[in-house]
Amino acid sequence: NWSENLLRLIPTLSFGLRSLFELSTWAWHLPNVVLHALNAALIVALTIRIHPNPISALMAGLFFALSPLLVHPVEWVGGSYDLFATAGVLSCIIALIDKRTIIAAIAATVALLSKENAMTLPIVAALIIVATNGVPRIRSEWWAQFKQWAPILALALISLTIRAMQVSGAD
């Protein structure tokens, strides 16, 4: 039988590491606080790339970090799924803007192995690639943008196929 958390592998592995500390409260909640801080730092990094004003970037990160809407994933142990997926998606977007395809693929893998809503990443990635490179007009431009996008699309399709097999009950 397939595990129901097969495609939520990264948070599930983190729970395994946390269980080494048994029921110690800090061991179960501190990683979520650290992940949230990482995500706030990624918001700062992303904002710098979009609008290179350090004050604006710090404000965006601060608003993200202190948003009351984001308390639940931070304080709830099960919120790790959302926090890992967010870190993966934000890292992927930053890597795409920086034209670091391999890092973007690794970040996409983290997102896809954390929560199903990361399946939207290929669409977001395509939009980011076009937004940063412009609409391709000739074949070489199409090919260059496709090479940036293809690894993320392939990872999402593999993840979707495995999830479909899992949901359908295939062994």
Image (cartoon, helix red, strand yellow):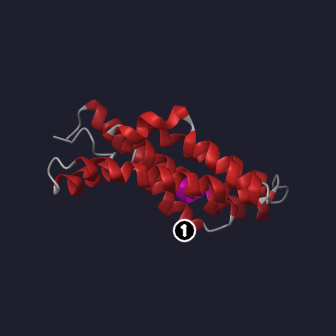
x then y, percent, for residue 111: 46, 50
Left or right position of 132 against 87:
right
- Judging depth in this view, the residue of 36 and 112 nearest the camera is 36
Figure check: 164 above or below 48? above
Residue, disc 1:
102
Give the quarter of the figure containing the C terminus.
Answer: top left
Are there few (<14), some (14-19), or many (20+) residues within 10 Å of tag 1?
Answer: some
Q: Is residue 54 magenta?
A: no
Residue at 53 percent across and 33 percent down: it is 68
Give the quarter of the figure containing the N terminus.
Answer: top left
Residue at 59 percent across and 66 percent down: it is 101
Q: Secondary structure at mark 1?
A: helix
Left or right position of 107 against 15:
right
Left or right position of 36 against 165:
right
Q: Amino acid at mark 1?
A: Ile
x then y, percent, for residue 137: 85, 55
Residue 110: quarter of image: bottom left
Q: Is residue 153 magenta?
A: yes
Residue at 18 percent across and 52 percent down: it is 19
Residue at 39 percent across and 47 percent down: it is 114
